[in-house]
Amino acid sequence: METIKQALKEEGVPRELSDSEIEKLLSDQCISTFQRNKLEREAKKNWDLFYKRNKNNFFKDRHWTTREFTELLTDQTIDEEKQISNKVLLEVGCGVGNFIFPLIETGCKYFFLACDFSPVAIDILKRNPLYNEEKCKAFVADITDKSTFVNSIDSFGYIGNIDIISLVFVLSAISPDKMSNAVDNLFEVLRPGGIVLFRDYGIFDHAMIRFSEGHKISDNFYVRQDGTRAFYFTKKNVMELFTKSGFQMISNEFVRKETVNKKEGISVPRIFIQSKFCKPKDL
């Protein structure tokens, strides 16, 4: 509740809320500790079920990434002495490959590492005709767990050699008390001077407002009908998470979109946060 009140007072509030929307957000009650712990225990199972049910048909391929993140088209993040063919991009929370495969199709010369903590998602990704281990290496890992995430990347020989990490609609699915572990681990594997490209749900997004009673886990953190979870960030949330782990902020802004439902004749406001953070070069 305090997060909502603070966000309403901050400069650059992502959108105006109606009195009924404010009242709804402030009156929502959190689920029980038992329910919250159960969702945490079953997080991987719920994402496995999601991918078993939806295969590769749910998320659209992300053809917008090079428009929003020009670093994917240039060498500005790469040391001059590093050959183009040796650039490495790590996609965290890759799902079934909706981020990397459009880039591979365009001839992007990065070598791609792709991880997800759902074995079902990784299996679907590896069965894509575009998957080729000369261009891409997909593996199962929990980014909040150093023993599986950092050690996996170390075993591939890429610790400190990753140029770009993409973190797109991933951190929001993680319990807030584990987010700092995830960002710490990203900092460890990224090379000095490398960057993180971040995009995720922003506070007061339409999806946040429309959750019914019984879906609030904690401030800004909600559970969907299928058991998967979503956190809605303020700019302060994102900035503090990354800077406390040692990153330098390049940009951190709300992105406002309108989603139009032509069938129902309605337009709803979508709020995202898009950010870039850099690991200092002098480390």
Image (cartoon, rainbow, N blue to C red):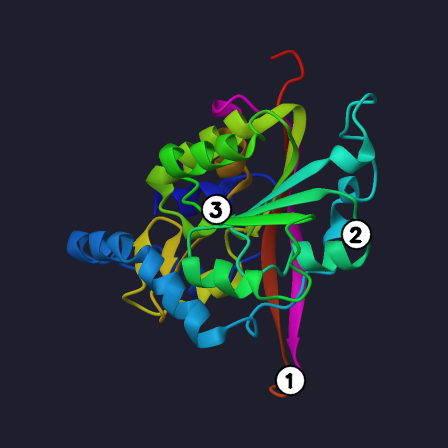
- How far from the left and from the top, in percent, is residue 270? 60, 61
Q: Which disc, if any, is residue 67?
A: 2
Indicate the quadrant where residue 30 lies: bottom left
Query: In the rendered image, is residue 53 in sight?
Result: yes
Q: Earlier in the sequence, mark 3 or mark 1?
A: 3
Which amino acid is tagged 1?
A: Gly
> How far separated are the C-alphas under marks 3 and 1?
32 Å
Q: Residue furthest top?
A: 282
The residue at 67%/28% (across/down) is 194
SS under mark 1: loop
The residue at 39%/33% (across/down) is 146
Q: Which disc, if any, is residue 265?
A: 1
Q: Earlier in the sequence, mark 3 or mark 2?
A: 2
Please report the bounds of the magenta region as a residue range. 243-262
Q: Residues within 10 Å of mark 1 (few under 14, many from 20)?
A: few
> How far separated are the C-alphas under marks 3 and 2?
22 Å
Which amino acid is tagged 3?
A: Leu
Indicate the quadrant where residue 198 lies: top right
